[in-house]
Image (tube, helix red, strand yellow):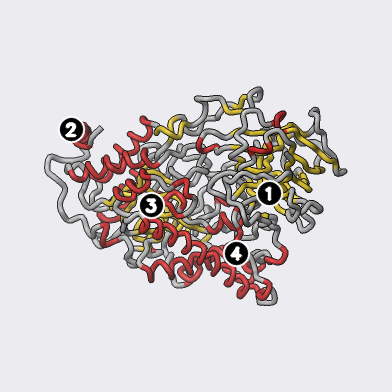
Amino acid sequence: MSASAIKPLFLCLLFSLGLVGCTPPTSDTGPSAADIFGNPSYRAVSYGGYRGLSREQGPTVEQLVEDVKILDAMGIKLLRTYNTSQYPQAERLLQAIQLVKANDPNFEMYVMLGAWIDAKNAWTEAVWDADNNAWVEGTGPDHTQGDVVNNSQEIETAVRLANDYPGIVKAIAVGNEAMVQWAVNYFVYPNTILKWVNFLQDAKAAGDLPGDVWITSSDNYESWGGGNSIYHTPDLTALMQAVDFISVHTYPFHDSFYNPSFWGVLPEEEALPFEAMTAASMGRAVDYAKSQYQAVADYMASVGISKPMHIGETGWASIDETAYGAGGSKAADEYKQKVFHDLLREWTDEAGISLFFFEAFDEQWKKATSPGDSENHFGLIALNNEVKYALWDAFDAGTFDGLTRDGEPLRKSFAGDRDALLASALVPPFRSQMAVRSIDTVQADRSPGEGVTEANYIVVHNTLSGNDPDASYPSAALKLTPWEGTATIELLPDGEVRVETRAGDWWGASLQIEGEVGENLANFSGGRMHFEIRGSSDVNFGLGFQTGNYLRGDQVNNFADFGPGTDHPIGEEWQAVELAIPDIGSGANMSDVTNIVAFLSQEKAPDRTLFVRNIYFSQ
């Protein structure tokens, strides 16, 4: 549907509701988006004002007025929201800003509206066909199509709000992490985002949307071409050409667990005081964020596009009880949050980059059943009105004097006791003691996709050697990948692969080939997969390998069943296993083995541990 086609619908609706008059809005709409974005005088933050365990009951206008005043005191002038029609917060926020402006003509607060974009059948469960070892076609999200009803409503509401509040709405972001393919519940391909970006650009050209409203999509750095080449498509290039600026997400916090290449204390730093060693570790985290930002800039330049780039989202959680806490990467605490925040602000202010730091206030709806999950603790201000360490200096300067949230004054976390705060902070892990998350024994004379001709293909083994002319190693490094935080997987010094499950409804992990294509093991189609295994005896799971790619829709699980009641019960003693590939690999494309070893269970079984060693394939 073109912008001109819906113009009468919008105008009719707005007139009938009494939301606009018969005369156009005044031209006094304040600074333009070009004046605001990249200007350190207009600092930005990601904002969600939800207090409760769900978003169904959003904050009131009165509560939002309180939040707006707090944000203004923090020096924030630009807010990013996430939905328009699904929940009432965005419109109420604009009303709150307008109320504050009515009482103070010099007050400035602007908004980048987020329009949430979903895939068709988003957030529904795919059905697993155990007999055919595959997902049932037509179930679960269809990533090739958008949810027409939801997406249309979100975009239409964004246009209406931008017209209703022309002095406040300065940008519209089409989708939030809507293209990154690990968002398996709802992601879409760039052509769906491009359709709506073009729609909004047409609306501006037709006069249906204020002409100075910038249009973007706010997404992960890989989605913008800064990582895996699977994203490098003509549609992405067209999208880059269509938007007014690129809004990039980067999260070193999450990668402290998933890809900790930058994380931890170097051997020469181990004797430093806590604050010095932490500063060094956090400096590398910031450099990691910069590298992801630069990777997007480099890709954009490689396709001949020059557009402004800003950071639509990054942040650091202050609490986590699992992957990022004391039992994980030891990243989550208020001290590190402040260091990350301050270093990022310093860099982006100097570089002329808007930084939508995630986020202003804690929210608890994201992981309502897990209060200690990091997703509930990214805010700079906690739900109990405690101002976290990143804002202590502002608090001491009287920034929040006389301001309240939900009618109560703000106060400093840890009662302002810095010694108590430091005592709660986690010492970053020492690199010398960190688990290995990559197997880097590589066959240098072969690239991924080239057929393996040797009789034995060694994944990890204590006695077999790739120096044997009848054996070889992987053609690229193998990344030990925990799937969506449901497990921990690591390589121990003695060559054992250790998997520990977490408290989810399912769990999975793999040794993933780090190539643009899978490993070509076509010559092993009639062969065997060998390994030794031991571990918890009361957990059921599939173990084998995967071919193809889930995101392309051609992934096949080539598994045997392990655990109680199967042909492969396990216990604390090592046992050798040989799996005939024809028995577990029916329908597998052995020329595209993407996860060389994979574990998957559809059952909840937290805190179970498995060990696998001496893994190889034979023809």
| Disc 2 residue type (three-letter) | Pro
| Residue 260 placement (x, y as % from top left) | 61, 59
Instruction: Measure the C-alpha gap from mark 3 to mark 4.
Output: 29 Å
Of residues 474 and 412, the one drawn nearer to the viewer in this rendering: 474
Instruction: Measure the C-alpha gap from mark 2 to mark 3.
Output: 29 Å
Q: Which residue is depicted at the point 69% across and 51% down?
A: 473
| Disc 4 residue type (three-letter) | Phe
Instruction: Measure the C-alpha gap from mark 2 to mark 1.
Output: 55 Å
N-terminal of the pair, mark 4 or mark 2, is: 2
Q: Quadrant of residue 565?
A: top right
Instruction: Measure the C-alpha gap from mark 4 to mark 2.
Output: 56 Å
Instruction: Measure the C-alpha gap from mark 3 to mark 1.
Output: 33 Å
Of residues 73 and 181, the one drawn nearer to the viewer in this rendering: 181
Mark identifier at residue 414: 4
N-terminal of the pair, mark 2 or mark 3, is: 2
- The image quadrant where one finds the C terminus is top right
What secondary structure is found at the residue carrying circle 2? Answer: helix
Q: Assess disc 4: are there few (<14), some (14-19) or many (≥20) residues with their C-alpha within 10 Å of its C-alpha.
A: some
Q: Label 3, on which residue?
A: 80
| Residue 542 placement (x, y as % from top left) | 71, 34
The residue sitting at the right extreme is 573
Q: Quadrant of residue 295?
A: bottom left
N-terminal of the pair, mark 3 or mark 1, is: 3
Q: Label 1, on which residue?
A: 488
Q: Label 2, on which residue?
A: 8
N-terminal of the pair, mark 3 or mark 4, is: 3
Q: Assess disc 2: are there few (<14), some (14-19) or many (≥20) residues with their C-alpha within 10 Å of its C-alpha.
A: few
What secondary structure is found at the residue carrying circle 4? Answer: helix
